[in-house]
Amino acid sequence: MYKYEQYVESANFIKDKIGNLKPKIAIILGSGLGVLSDEFEEKVTINYSQIPNFPISTVEGHAGELIVGKLNDTEIIAMNGRFHYYEGYELNETTFPIRVFKILGIEKLILTNAAGGINTNFKAGEFMVINDYLSFLGESVLRGKNLDEFGDRFIDMSETFDKELSKKLADTIVKHTGKAQEGVYAYMKGPTFETPAEIRALRVLGADAVGLSTVPEAVVAHHCNIKTVAVSCITNMAAGVLDEKLSYDDVKQTADKVKMNFKEIIKEYVKMI
Ligand code: HPA
């Protein structure tokens, strides 16, 4: 368990590095979507390993740096590389940066990820705005002593993802790609992709897409009253939907194909919200 003072220490370190920049928006860049950071101006890059108390990212395709700067004239802080439960981190480590962002004054959080499509109306390469989630981890990221500085012990979860922010994101996606999907994201532990039987079960339970991230971060952001919006890039159809095996290479390939669209969507979106 972290103490409140540790979050403050990390935030102070970042504040010192970013000078006059005072971002109100944070974004977490999912697998293959790190390209956005090329677009930042006046940017300050801080490697996670420099920041006191920060966990260090290990997964391939995740750079492990914080980038602060201006995107389309909007001050923003980006995480290029996130912390996943399957890497071996404790849940409160995977979400450590969110509370640091809160102390830094972040008011809105954009979560992005790569996900497998469960809904058979979806196609690889489409974007899905997440309107709710299913969590099968069995353990809440908020388990343990509540840090009252951030939020209450018991919190309502009927609107984890802010409706207004989500609508604006869907509209921006439609403008750039002609179509935006919307649906429920099922959070799985990984690192195995799911079995076809798990996917069939998840579909019955109401999931539209499946992935290995985002939910812990969204819950912690919701707890400390950061407005959150989340989008999945459907990089593949989930196990058993098509007659083909899943591979991380395919996930990366699809993310690579949509990254220019993604960049334009987010550039426009951050200016709008
Ligand atoms: N399952 C879990 N995580 C994923 C998938 C998937 O099919 N695709 C991209 N991330």
Image (cartoon, helix red, strand yellow):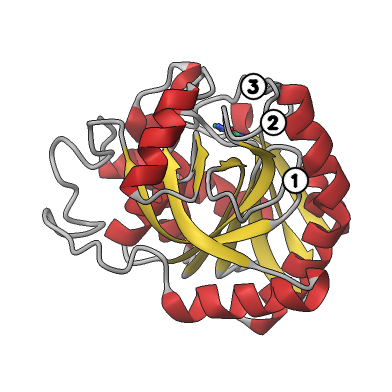
Quadrant containing the N terminus is top left
Task: Identify the residue at image location x=21%, y=59%.
Answer: 151
User: Is 229 situated above or below 64?
Assistant: below
Q: Are marks 2 and 3 in contact (CB under 8 Å)?
A: yes
Per the model, the C-alpha gap separating discs 2 and 3 is 6 Å
Q: Dot 1, how many residues are within 10 Å of its Cα: few (below 14), some (14-19), or many (20+)?
A: many
Task: Identify the residue at image location x=36%, y=35%.
Answer: 201
Of labels 1 and 2, the one closer to you? 1
Closest to the observer: 233 or 105?
233
- The local secondary structure at tag 2 comes to loop
Q: Is residue 169 left or right of residue 150?
A: right
Q: Are marks 1 and 2 in contact (CB under 8 Å)?
A: no
Q: Earlier in the sequence, mark 1 or mark 2?
A: 1
Q: Which residue is mark 3?
A: 59
Q: Amino acid at mark 1?
A: Leu
- Residue 62, numbered circle: 2
Q: Earlier in the sequence, mark 1 or mark 3?
A: 1
Task: Identify the residue at image location x=83%, y=34%.
Answer: 253
Residue 252 x/y as whole percent:
77, 33
Q: Which residue is mark 1?
A: 33
- The local secondary structure at tag 3 comes to loop
Residue 18 x/y as whole percent:
67, 56
User: Is 248 situated above or below 121?
Assistant: above
Q: Is residue 226 left or right of residue 273?
A: left
- The local secondary structure at tag 1 comes to loop
Ligand 1 occupies quarter: top right
Closest to the observer: 243 or 21?
243
* Residue 238 makes an appearance in the image: yes
Q: Residue furthest front?
A: 243
Residue 262 x/y as whole percent:
78, 59
Quadrant containing the C terminus is bottom right
